[in-house]
């Protein structure tokens, strides 16, 4: 069907399985690579072939270009899909693939390099007259200059370290009186963190929404956008729930933003799948944030709404086929939501919760899709991102999709490790979220508020008594052989004991 | 059979006295049986549908409970709906032997909540600590987490050193 | 949201769970009923309330109107969804619900009664000038009359017992020379089976397709059709795989048939969901076959293609809401296929295979939906239809959907009992099926041909060696405690021994 | 360790001589090990991913095998891909004791393939039957199925009567 007979997936977890599913449907043999921690992983079991590429730490395995390419050569694969993360935005890897005669499933190297540098991308967009967050983008040495430019943009502004990342050297300045101390501390923090005290100014967008556009280009000059994804629901700048369409985008804004997204793609000489991220302010102005030159984690919400399989499309396009859709064939139908189900403990500051997944019941039925990388009996390793699965629902409109997501989350059962499933149920119940009124700071504010869980007194009291009864019935059955294959996580015992003691101490 | 049951979920705890009929051979795996909870009579139709998963029907209402033993005797983690309860169970015989506040007596072992690496030890042996005070910092999956004292006490022994890798449940520190 | 707070589902298995999922999404509490065989069944566990209604045999439980109504009263349910089968087309039950003040989720009683009688429905359609299979529909006493009418319709014709059913008293007559003996034996068989020797003639439609149209009406005078489902893939007149759209229907035929389906609905005064079944001959003439006055097993293929939740729509309409869609909003997108996964043994004449389902891995990922009524650890009871689950896929076109179904079937793993999963893989590989060239006799012919399984020599030989290796490794691990919780089905041992001996006897 | 392996799927049977290294403590649950099958050396990287489910990687190719013991000693049902194999395993010691055609000696018990009801007994005791001849008709889930003789022989004993209900595996008839 396509030009490829065999494809290596240079990734692990749910996305590796996702890509292999697409390959199977296209009749392409799959090659997995795996580290010591992943011998039993689902992607290794799912693949037609599997090659070991090193110890558990990613730098010694999944990030080792030489070992991934060696596996590709040994297997005779003709193409490599990098998934997301790991080597997916690594231009050096893409170049190395080309040098070995392997098709890298992604954009051309120059596009990766341009978009890989935030400042270069920003400059290119400014030159082309495309909207970026107003800012200097260059080193500012004197307090006077900083104040002058800030006054020009209008407060609040952000001071940012030029070599920055991870929140270091970042200062929000609300008015001029705060500027002197902010300028000083941002510079010294930047110096300490990056050995470079350069800072620059950007206009601070208050309560922005994070909206991204999927774009897709082929090697025949076609480049289209596949509408937006709403990604404002973030915890500490990490997306946790995405949806499409965005409740904040109407047809005219969608058309304007989509047009800009395509222009940015053209500017970069883009082919294959990419994502243009924008901030949208409360006046519906939008600003380019960055471009991700790979498949996004949250690509399924687009797939559900448009009925397009992005991974199969990626592979086809890399094989030289033309885009399967024209811009006028792209029509949104209904509403899709994705929840990223993580092995983490919402009651303990979202601390990762790796370990043995000793029980798993996955939601199913109409409009429910679970893209998972785990199974009952799998031990979630310590070394990687603790994403277990992406739960995606579709329904005819946002209200119905929210109800369906609630139903699906209620069906989800994970035992042995903690997950954020109950946390999502809390989010869905929040009236502002239900109404579509939220921005990138919503979730952190909600968590800081420590909003008490909605009271469902009747049912909860009944549940409490049922728990007591069930424990008694289980213990009464004898030495509980029946439950012994559900190993009690050491953590729970520890936590339980700790909490219990704390509680006992309260007046 | 008479049980003293303590359930805890989030910040709430409840206590019950639960009376169940003695186990008969025929009804040990699934049956309808009568019970008394806090003197109030009730009837439950129950069965174990999969290992550790119980279906209970009480007055027509259908519940599912996932029951897992935790480390200690008579201690369970029970999931009902989306809520998790820690349930302590004592039958009338063991109640008096163990006493009500067993958790307070003797040193308490603080175990690693997950496999990881000890980044920092924040307290020294013999130091007095307050409830909630940070004891150690453990790193896993590139995130750091502070292990805090579950109660006030004295650090009797620190079992780990900075930089050391630990398995889940490994003893970190004894709190006297 | 809807007028109902609580709804009783008068059914079991996958359809009971399907309806309850819809209820949860609509915020409606659910009430299950169950027999002795179903105490641990998924629908009982899924429901908010559950009432026992009798012993395992359906006539003593799921078919007992009095007990179902008693459960409804005790629970305080306001509506009853009958699913399919059991009481779903029982007008007496619908009347009894009404008498108790319960909303029966289905059509009005007169519509059920009209369509419940094949002859009455046939007469009504003839009167209205709507297409039925040409036939006499009345008793024919003399051979001469039979021959005359047969000549009029043109051979081949069918002789059918007036009181018939189950293939008794049924004769295909290919030409006049066969008529005398056929007439005699059909009458005597009818006499023996039904104590009534009356027979009538119908034109025999050769190699027909079985195409059905979903219709939907509300209580505000709106009645629309939701396009077709292709149901020609049948084994002994039982549907096993359905799809939508039908490869045999183009837009103009769809419009004509849809119009007739709506007219038939109007004729019956129909509301809620119903299905009009047609036979379509090789010249694309179509004839009314019968109407099912309930939700069909295969409703999900319509849901996937149209993006409409038929069960939620049923409940809304029963609550008095108007149809959520106009005819012009009904647009097919892509292609959906359903496989009915049964507990039956394709290698043993499709004999039912109840028992302990000791291992279960359900397919997932993009475009895959599993509507299931079972779980790992469930014992499939002897007493009911052995449908385990409905595996449904959607993709952009038929070819892609077939590839996706193949992928999904390959992911499906059921241990402990036999299923027809491998049988579906054989069907999908058949070139005629892949090309869309099939009729209602296709599957029985394919099975009679005993088409040898497609040879995949390389892989199969490797698989054989892997099986040998795996068994040795497992046995080497010691006394195989590890596999001991996978109880060996008594059947397999028996079958294995039997086959082995047979093989040993061959020359 | 030397195994004589017989696999059977559909109408095909294969036989192999398989040599595996002796079990060492460290490698009993997962390892890469070298084997010889029919004299040809090979290497397998294997592990048990869930109870009874094995992942095997041979020359880079990844396979999954579900292994379940069946009734008899050394007899397994193994699923690889969509194919099911019946595997008979004998190590070199037991091979000679058991003999190759054990299945032919002594009476053979025909068991019920599924729970159901006996509708008809088609043969009488002491009757000679041919391979493939119908012995009984059993009904379950409203379908009737004929149980046929797996080989020629003589009906030694019929264990059931018409109308009787039987559990899966229940002895129906002994074939001498």
Image (cartoon, coloured by chain):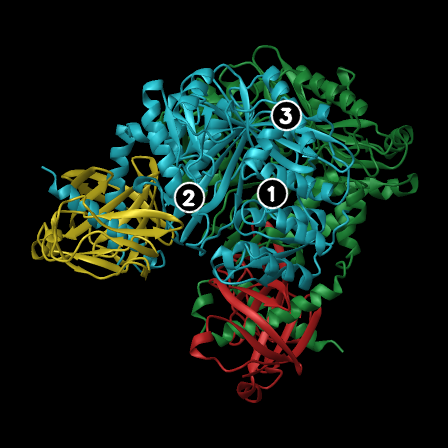
Chain colours: A green, B red, C cyan, D yellow
- Seen from the viewer's position, the closer of residues D152 and C491 is D152
**SS for dot 3:** helix
Q: Which residue is mark 1?
A: A391
Percent position of residue A344, x then y: 60, 53
| Front of the two marks 2 and 3 | 2
**In terms of sequence position, does the residue under pointer 2 or pointer 3 come before the other?**
3
Estimate how packed mark 1 is, as few (under 14), some (14 to 19) or many (20 or more) residues with alpha carbons within 10 Å: many
Residue C381 percent across, percent down from the top left? 43, 55
Cα separation, mark 3 vs mark 1, equals 53 Å
* Residue B148 versus residue A344 in the image, above or below: below
Q: Which residue is mark 2?
A: C195
Quadrant (top left, top right, bottom left, bottom right) of the N terminus of chain A? top left
Tag count in the figure? 3
Dot 2, crowdedness within 10 Å: few (<14), some or many (≥20)?
Answer: few
Residue A309 appears in the picture as rendered: yes
CA gap between label 2 and label 1 equals 59 Å
Q: Residue furthest top?
A: A220
Figure quadrant of the C terminus of chain A: bottom right
On the rendered structure, is B15 left or right of D32? right
Q: Chain of mark 2?
A: C
- Displayed quadrant of residue C276: top right
Q: Helix, strand or loop at disc 2?
A: loop
Question: Against C6, is A506 above or below?
Answer: below
How far apart are the two marked residues, 2 and 3, measured between alpha carbons?
30 Å
Q: Chain of mark 1?
A: A
Secondary element at image label 1 = strand
Name the residue at 65% across, 74% down. Answer: A501
Mark on residue C127?
Answer: 3
Read off the chain for label 3: C
- Residue A502 at what x, y percent from top left? 68, 73
Residue at point 46% right, 63% down? B51
Q: In the image, are marks 2 and 3 on the same chain? A: yes
């Amino acid at each position: 069907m396509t030009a490829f007979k065999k494809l290596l997936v240079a990734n692990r977890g749910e996305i590796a399985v996702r890509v292999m599913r697409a390959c199977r449907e296209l009749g392409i043999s799959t090659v997995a690579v795996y580290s010591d921690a992943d011998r039993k992983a689902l992607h290794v079991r799912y693949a037609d072939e599997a090659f070991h590429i090193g110890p558990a730490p990613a730098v010694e395995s999944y990030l080792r270009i030489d070992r991934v390419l060696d596996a590709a050569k040994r297997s005779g694969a003709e193409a490599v899909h990098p998934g997301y993360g790991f080597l997916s935005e690594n231009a050096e890897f893409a170049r190395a693939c080309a040098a070995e005669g392997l098709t890298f499933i992604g954009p051309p190297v120059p596009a990766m390099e341009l978009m890989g540098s935030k400042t270069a991308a920003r400059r290119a967009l400014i030159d082309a007259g495309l909207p970026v967050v107003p800012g200097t983008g260059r080193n500012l040495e004197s307090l006077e200059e900083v104040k002058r430019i800030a006054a020009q943009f209008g407060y609040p502004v952000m001071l940012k370290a030029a070599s920055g990342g991870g929140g270091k050297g970042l200062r929000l300045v609300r008015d001029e009186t705060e500027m002197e101390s902010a300028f000083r501390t941002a510079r010294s923090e930047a110096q300490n963190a990056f050995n470079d005290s350069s800072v620059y100014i950007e206009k601070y967008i208050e309560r922005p929404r994070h909206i991204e556009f999927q774009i897709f280009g082929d090697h025949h000059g076609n480049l289209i956008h596949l509408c937006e994804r709403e990604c404002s629901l973030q915890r500490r700048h990490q997306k946790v729930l995405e949806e499409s369409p965005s409740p904040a985008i109407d047809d005219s804004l969608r058309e304007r933003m989509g047009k800009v997204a395509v222009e940015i793609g053209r500017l970069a000489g883009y082919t294959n799948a990419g994502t243009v991220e924008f901030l949208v302010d409360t006046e519906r102005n939008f600003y380019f944030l960055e471009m991700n030159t790979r498949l996004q984690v949250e690509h399924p919400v687009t797939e559900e709404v448009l009925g397009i399989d992005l991974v199969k499309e990626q592979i086809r396009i890399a094989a030289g086929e033309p885009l399967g859709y024209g811009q006028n064939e792209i029509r949104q139908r209904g509403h899709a939501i994705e929840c990223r189900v993580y092995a983490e403990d919402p009651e303990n500051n979202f601390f990762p919760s790796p370990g043995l997944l000793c029980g798993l019941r996955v939601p199913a039925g109409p409009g429910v899709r679970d893209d998972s990388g785990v199974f009952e009996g799998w031990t979630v390793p310590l070394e990687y991102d603790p994403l277990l699965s992406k739960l995606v629902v579709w329904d005819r409109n946002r209200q119905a999709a929210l109800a369906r997501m609630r139903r699906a989350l209620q069906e989800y059962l994970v035992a042995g490790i903690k997950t954020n499933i109950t946390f999502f149920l809390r989010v869905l119940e929040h009236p502002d979220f239900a109404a579509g009124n939220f921005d990138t700071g919503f979730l952190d504010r909600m968590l800081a508020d420590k909003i008490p869980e909605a009271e469902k007194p009747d049912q909860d009291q009944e549940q409490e008594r049922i728990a007591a009864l069930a424990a008694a019935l289980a213990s009464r059955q004898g030495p509980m052989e029946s439950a012994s294959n559900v190993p009690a996580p050491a953590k729970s015992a520890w936590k339980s004991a700790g909490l219990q003691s704390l509680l006992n101490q309260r007046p | 059979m008479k049980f003293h049951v303590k359930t805890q979920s989030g910040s709430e705890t409840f206590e019950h006295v639960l009376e169940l009929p003695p186990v008969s051979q025929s009804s040990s795996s699934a049956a309808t049986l009568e019970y008394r909870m806090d003197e109030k009579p009730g009837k439950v139709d129950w069965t174990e549908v999969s290992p550790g998963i119980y279906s209970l029907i009480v007055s027509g209402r259908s519940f599912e409970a996932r029951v897992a033993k935790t480390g200690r005797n008579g201690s369970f983690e029970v999931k009902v709906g989306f809520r998790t309860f820690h349930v302590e169970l004592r039958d009338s015989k063991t109640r008096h032997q163990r006493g009500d506040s067993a958790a307070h007596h003797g040193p308490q072992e603080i175990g690693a909540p997950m496999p990881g690496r000890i980044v920092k030890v924040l307290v020294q042996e013999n130091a007095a600590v307050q409830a909630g005070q940070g004891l150690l910092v453990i790193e896993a999956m590139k995130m750091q987490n502070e292990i805090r004292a579950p109660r006030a006490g004295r650090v009797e022994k620190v079992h780990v050193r900075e930089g050391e890798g630990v398995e889940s449940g490994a003893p970190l520190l004894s709190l006297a």
